[in-house]
Image: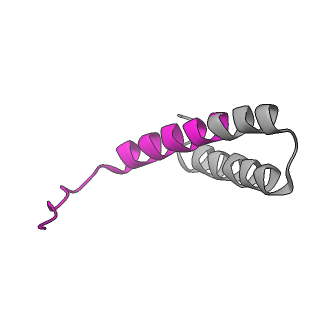
Amino acid sequence: MIMPTPSEPKPEQNSSQAAEQVASAHRILKELQKTLGNHPELGEAITKLEMALATLAVKTGGLL
């Protein structure tokens, strides 16, 4: 199978798309945590996503 060659993305698009994906994953994990209750791995994953969102916010000047 031949994979298509991606075009050169713009940095602001990468950050915006990454922020959207991380935020979506964060929401899903928070809902799972509500459904399943507190679990150490879920809490750790949520914390890591929150840190990633904060990093993206700093890199984009808060334009998420």
- Residue 48 is left or right of residue 19, and the answer is right
**At x 73% / y 36%, what residue is drawn?**
30
Region in magenta: 1-27
Residue situated furthest front in the rendering: 36
Name which quarter of the figure residue 16 lies in: top left
**25 in magenta:** yes
Asked whether 48 or 13 is in front, the reply is 48
Please, which colouring scheme is shown?
one colour
Marker count (numbered) = 0
Residue 52: x %, y % from top left: 64, 52
- Residue 59 is left or right of residue 3, and the answer is right
- Residue 3 is left or right of residue 11, and the answer is left
Residue situated furthest bottom in the rendering: 1
**At x 20% / y 58%, what residue is drawn?**
6
Asked whether 61 or 50 is in front, the reply is 50
Residue 8: x %, y % from top left: 22, 57
**41 in magenta:** no
Name which quarter of the figure residue 12 lies in: top left
Residue 43: x %, y % from top left: 81, 50
Asked whether 7 or 25 is in front, the reply is 25
Residue 42 to residue 36: above or below: below
Asked whether 21 or 2 is in front, the reply is 2
**At x 15% / y 62%, what residue is drawn?**
5
**At x 79% / y 57%, what residue is drawn?**
41
Q: Main secondary structure of the magenta part?
A: helix
Rendered-image quadrant of the N terminus: bottom left
Residue 9: x %, y % from top left: 27, 52
